[in-house]
Image (spheres, grey):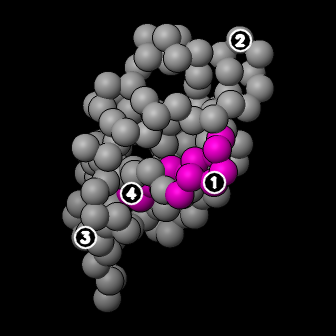
Amino acid sequence: MKRQQHWQSSQPFIHGHTVQVDELDFLQHVNNKTYLTWMEQVAWLHSQSVGINHDTQKRLNRIMVIKEHRMFYHAGSYLDDELLIGTWLGEQKGCCVRERHYQIIRVGDGLTVFTATTEFVCVDLKNLRPKPIPEAFIAPYLN
């Protein structure tokens, strides 16, 4: 019997998605690289939902860039599976690094099919050197 899974955060940003045929590989399950695409999409949707967009990044001369992904595939996803793709911010490490977590739950059986953590580094848009994460990149997520 498959165990029901629950969100690993009490406040995730959640985006619904139905698996499409172009997201499958030759084994007829979701291609591994598609999960990475979904991670990028849901993180950006989350940022935009709290008012952080390209204009904000330009105005502050800051952007968060990926330092590392840790991805875990727990079960397959297949054509027409309805998924809930969740993300939330994790620990800030020092002045410049922040974690973001991801969890994908299959609606049909409630099973967590994928989890991941990304470490982002805040950098200056002009010289791409690490800079402290501005308050405007932190406070909007806390409301």
Q: Secondary structure at mark 2?
A: loop
Q: Mark number for residue 104?
A: 4
Dot 3 and dot 2 residues touching (CB under 8 Å): no
Residue occupying image coordinates x 47% and y 61%: 114
Image height of 93 relative to 139, above or below: below
Residue occupying image coordinates x 68% and y 21%: 124
Residue type at mark 4 is Ile
Disc nearer the start of the sequence (3/2): 3
According to the image, label 3 marks what residue? 109
Dot 4 and dot 1 residues touching (CB under 8 Å): no
Disc nearer the start of the sequence (2/1): 1
Viewer-side residue, 60 vs 121: 60
Q: CA distance from mark 4 to mark 1?
A: 25 Å
Q: Mark number for residue 93?
A: 1
User: Residue 92 magenta-drawn?
Assistant: yes
Disc nearer the start of the sequence (2/4): 4
* Residue 66 in sight here: no
Residue type at mark 3 is Asp
Q: CA distance from mark 3 to mark 2?
A: 46 Å
Viewer-side residue, 5 vs 13: 13
Disc nearer the start of the sequence (1/3): 1
Residue type at mark 2 is Lys
Dot 1 and dot 3 residues touching (CB under 8 Å): no
Magenta residues, start to end:
91-104
Residue with the most extreme bottom position:
1
Viewer-side residue, 128 vs 102: 128
Residue 38 location in percent, x, y? 45, 40
Front of the two marks 3 and 4: 4
According to the image, label 2 marks what residue? 126
Residue type at mark 1 is Lys
